[in-house]
Image: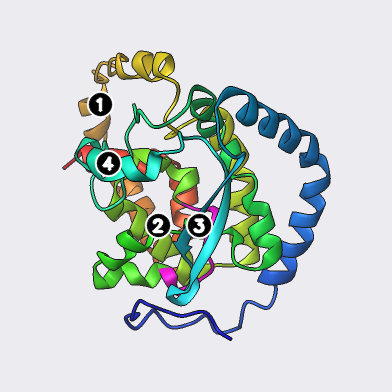
Amino acid sequence: MPAARPFALAPVLPAPPRPATWKRPFDLVLSLILLAPLVPIFAMVAALVKLTSPGPVFFVQTRIGRDGAPCAILKFRSMNLDAEARRAALLAQSDRDGLCFKARNDPRITPVGRWLRRLSLDELPQILNVVQGTMSLVGPRPALPSEVAAYPVRALQRLAVLPGITGLWQVSGRAEIGFDGMIDLDIAYVRSASLRTDLAILLRTFNAVLSGRGAYCPPQESQSHDQQTLEPADPDRRRRRQDGRHHVRRRHHRDQGHLYRRCPVRWHLQRGPDHLSRRRARG
């Protein structure tokens, strides 16, 4: 019996000219390859979670998947047992603009859970969701039912593909990017998903995890990060703007515009993880 689809989806963007027949075999083969070397990490993390806080090792939560179908995703538990009951009282403390709740100093997170989130180890069990077929290795992150119910029409386009463990949002800054920026990145992926794109995002995921960019770190690290000062402005910037090479910049911008129209995901990857924050800073 097919799963119920509680959310009426708006018309999504036209499908790619060729169906993504490569997606499921790619996810299944790579997930099975990754499972064997990850078993020791699974065992170590499970032991840490069990020994440092009362409660189960795994946390199962209902999220919204492709076409609005609910699915149960698996994570290592990084919060206290009463986390769901306390969520409503903490919504006002969200550090992120938009619908998605993110708090840098969330009191529900356990000490070990902070490190698991910092290294994204709490998401590892979702490889089993990929094997099951309810998630993909690369795609938009699965959202809560309450968040999807409040989505604007445009945001529903991100439900046109399977949710993923990683995606363009994760390698572009994660929690540093607001809700609208996340939707832009997810729609860009929906428009131009390809095997090459998935491989590029997976490769950049390792760098994003190791650098911790956009992840909410333990309090000591996040405090030092908040105290960082901006670098002084380059005194030669005005001179470089007036040195007669403006035609080169115009040609670059024209080429970038053509690239964005052809393949927006590749455009985002070439621009690097800082371009959204720079664009917001310019106002």
45 within the magenta span: no
- The answer to which of marks 3 and 1 sits earlier in the sequence is 1
> Do the residues bearing badges 3 and 1 touch, measured as CB atoms within 8 Å?
no
**Could you tell me if residue 245 is visible in this image?**
no
Query: Depth check: 217 or 129 in front?
Result: 129
Where does label 1 land, which residue?
A: 237
Magenta range is 159-168
Q: Amino acid at mark 2?
A: Leu
Instruction: Nearest to the eye among marks 2 and 1: give it.
Output: 2
Q: Amino acid at mark 4?
A: Arg
SS at badge 2:
helix
* Residue at image location 27% in from the left, 41% down from the top: 96
Q: Amino acid at mark 3?
A: Arg
Where does label 4 land, which residue?
A: 96
Q: CA distance from mark 2 to mark 4?
A: 16 Å
As displayed, is residue 147 above or below residue 174?
below
Q: Dot 1, crowdedness within 10 Å: few (<14), some or many (≥20)? A: few
Query: Depth check: 140 or 189 in front?
Result: 140
Q: CA distance from mark 3 to mark 1?
A: 28 Å
Where does label 3 land, which residue?
A: 266
Instruction: Nearest to the eye among marks 2 and 4: give it.
Output: 4
